[in-house]
Structures are given as C-alpha cells and as structure tokens.
C-alpha cells in the first residue's frame, strides 16, 4: 500500500516541475555555510578534515562526512525555496525518521525568532537523490536558515529560487566563536524527527550563536587524537558530552580528565560544560559510577582553581513530568527529549556566553 495515494497530505514529491525555478550550487555566493569544515575551499560537506578523522577511528572517519549541525543562511524574496540534494554515506535506522537522518528543514527569521516553515522531505524509495520545496509564508525579503541532514553526507547540494528573485547574504550570528559540542549519537542528533529539532540547533536559534557539532554515533571515546583536534578549535563554549560512548566507567576514567586537561592547556579561558548521559538509571551502579567520573573531573578542575567549568547531571536533562516519554528507545531522545536538553544545556550556554 502506498499511503500517499490514499492520503495526499502524506504524499512526497521527489522531482519538481516549477516554472521559473532556478538552481545554483550551495557552495556559491550568496549562500553562507556554517558548522562544516571549510566547504567553499574544499568543495566538500564535512564536519572535520578526513585525515584527522581517520587518525581518530574508523567510526569517526565515516561519520565525519555526515552534515549534522551544518546550516546554510541567506536572504531572498523568492516565494519558495527548493533543494536538490545528492546524499552519500547514509545511515538508515528503524527508530529515526528519514526527515531527520536524510532531510533538511527551513526556518525564517520574523524579527524576533527563527520560525519553522517546513521540511524538505526525502522520498522513502530513493532518499539519496531528491528534490523538495518549501513555500515561504511571508512575502518580501526573508532571512532563511536551512539545517542539513543529521545522519547522511552530501556530495552535491543546490538551492532553488524563483528566477526573478533577489538573494543576498543572510543574517549573521553573534560575533563570538562557535559553541563546540563533542559527544555521542545524541549529540549528533539521533533520533530527532528533523535536523532543526537537534538540541545544539535549538540552542543556536535561541541565542543566535553559531556552533560546531562533533557528535559521533558510537564513536566519541575521548581519544588523544580527538582531544588534540578539539583543543585546536576556536570556541566560545565547549560542551563535553561523550559519557554515553565510553565503553565502561574505566575507559571514561582513563580519558575524561585527560581530555579536559588537554583542552584547557590550549584554551585557558573557554568555559567548559561537562554533561553526563541523560538516560541514567539511579539504581544502576554502573550508570552512577560513570556520572561520578564526569563529576570528579569537574571537582578536580575547581580544586585546581578553574572557575570556568560547569557540571550538568544528565539525570536532570529529562526532568519533570513524563521524563520517561522523552526517548524513542529508552536511550535516544525524541523531539520532546531534545527540547528539554536544549532548555537545560542552553541555560548554561547562555550563562557562559555572558561571561
């Protein structure tokens, strides 16, 4: 059964026939790309250099090409925005919608906030190569932000506008360095329903601050090579959230404080937020021990005179009523879980940005 033939509201159009539609590469002006590693210089959509990723691990080498956290900003008076995307290295998951893993979504700034307008929905039968369109509700010149797929890479991406439309550089982020996130599949965005619901993206919209997402599904283990790379990245805040991917508490104990020291040596003033995993079970001694390792790094930093460190107990990320409705599988957040994470982590990010 093809549900789109029964319910047209669920039909997905993967090839567009719009009169006057004109595409141009997302690598061209006036499109500005954020959250990726020098895409206009390299011609590639990657989060970190391939050679560095390969030195860290095989998993990071593969996932480094995923565009989680990547965004495109521009302004236009086109009544619609279309995309034509060719994806690569896709991950298909039973518990994450294609709109999150393979889709893009679009926001328009209304003068006070970025407002969701629609999702570029990939077709179920051929999500690796598709076209999609979102119609903009407000006429006139609009400030556009497009979020890129969370669990796919991009080999080619084109932005389509009306042939008579004007287009220019988009709204700038606040004049600070990006917020740097390092962590697990949750940090990468699993299992958000669409890219804009990813917690770093939600925090970025709330504070108009750029960010770099170095979340690697199953691959964030605090390796020395990754610590060196993180230490060399300019950041306004560093959110360290890799508890989930450490194989056990012993591994975490052997890497967590070391990663902190390596980062702090190169970045003596950057605020650091340590986060323990959100699905902690208070009755599980292993979970509690892992949290204690993260907390101990924080305490030792304070004892050493570091006044720019913060600790967020992951148990409180889903705090409140219906905390157990915040994941799709007991581990990975759904949209409700991500919004609660954005509120809790975002409050600390806001505090750090004000220092």
Image: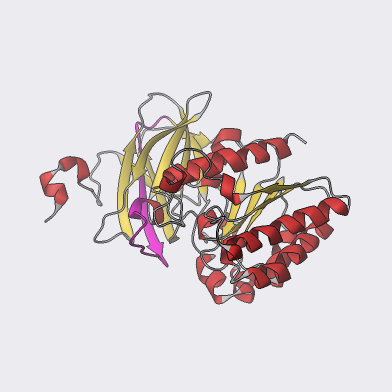
Q: Residue at x 88, y 54 (%)?
A: 304
Q: Nearer the viewer, residue 274 or 71?
A: 274
Query: Can you see residue 29?
Result: no
Query: How far across and down, in percent of the image, does residue 287 sit?
Result: 59, 61
Magenta region includes residue 88: yes
- Which quarter of the rendered picture does the C terminus lie within? top right
To which quarter of the image does residue 125 belong? Answer: bottom left
Left or right: 28 in relation to 15 = right
User: What colour scheme was applied to this rendering of the protein?
Assistant: secondary structure
Image coords of residue 298 (percent x, y): 76, 53
Q: Is residue 113 left or right of residue 94?
A: right
Please state the horizontal and vertical placement of residue 262, each as a whole percent of the image.
79, 63
Which is nearer the eye, 252 or 103? 252
Which residue corresponds to the image point at 35% horizontal and 43% vertical from the top-left? 119
Residue 158, above or below 62: above
| Residue 200 part of the magenta-drawn span | no
Highlighted range, magenta: 77-99
Residue lying at 14% horizontally and 43% vertically, measured from the top left: 7
């Amino acid at each position: 059964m093809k549900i789109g033939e029964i319910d047209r509201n669920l039909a997905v159009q993967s090839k567009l026939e719009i009169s006057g539609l004109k595409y141009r590469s997302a690598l061209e002006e006036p499109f500005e790309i954020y959250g990726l590693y020098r895409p206009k210089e390299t011609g590639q959509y990657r989060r970190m250099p391939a050679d560095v990723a390969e030195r860290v691990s095989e998993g990071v080498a593969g996932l480094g090409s995923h565009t989680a956290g990547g965004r495109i900003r521009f302004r236009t008076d086109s009544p619609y925005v279309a995309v034509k995307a060719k994806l690569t290295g896709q991950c298909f998951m039973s518990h994450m919608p294609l709109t999150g893993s393979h889709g893009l979504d679009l926001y328009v700034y209304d003068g006070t906030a970025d407002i969701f307008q629609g999702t570029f929905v990939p077709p179920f039968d051929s999500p690796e190569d598709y076209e999609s369109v979102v119609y903009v509700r407000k006429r006139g010149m609009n400030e556009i932000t497009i979020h890129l797929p969370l669990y796919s890479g991009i080999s080619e991406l084109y932005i389509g506008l009306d042939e008579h439309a004007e287009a220019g550089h988009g709204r700038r982020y606040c004049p600070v360095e990006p917020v740097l996130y390092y962590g697990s599949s949750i940090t990468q965005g699993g299992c958000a329903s669409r890219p804009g619901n990813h917690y770093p993206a939600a925090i970025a919209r709330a504070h108009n601050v750029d960010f770099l997402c170095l979340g690697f599904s199953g691959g964030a283990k605090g390796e020395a090579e990754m610590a060196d790379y993180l230490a060399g990245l300019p950041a306004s805040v560093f959110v360290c959230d890799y508890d989930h991917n450490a194989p056990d508490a012993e591994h975490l104990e052997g890497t967590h404080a070391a990663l902190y020291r390596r980062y702090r040596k190169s970045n003596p003033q950057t605020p650091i937020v340590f986060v323990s995993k959100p699905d902690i079970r208070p009755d599980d001694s292993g979970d509690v021990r892992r949290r204690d390792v993260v907390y101990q790094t924080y305490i030792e930093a304070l004892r050493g005179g570091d006044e720019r460190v913060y600790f967020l107990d992951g148990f409180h990320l889903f705090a409140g009523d219906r905390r157990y409705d915040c994941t799709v599988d007991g581990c990975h957040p759904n949209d409700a879980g991500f919004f609660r994470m954005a509120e809790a982590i975002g409050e600390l990010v806001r505090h750090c940005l004000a220092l």
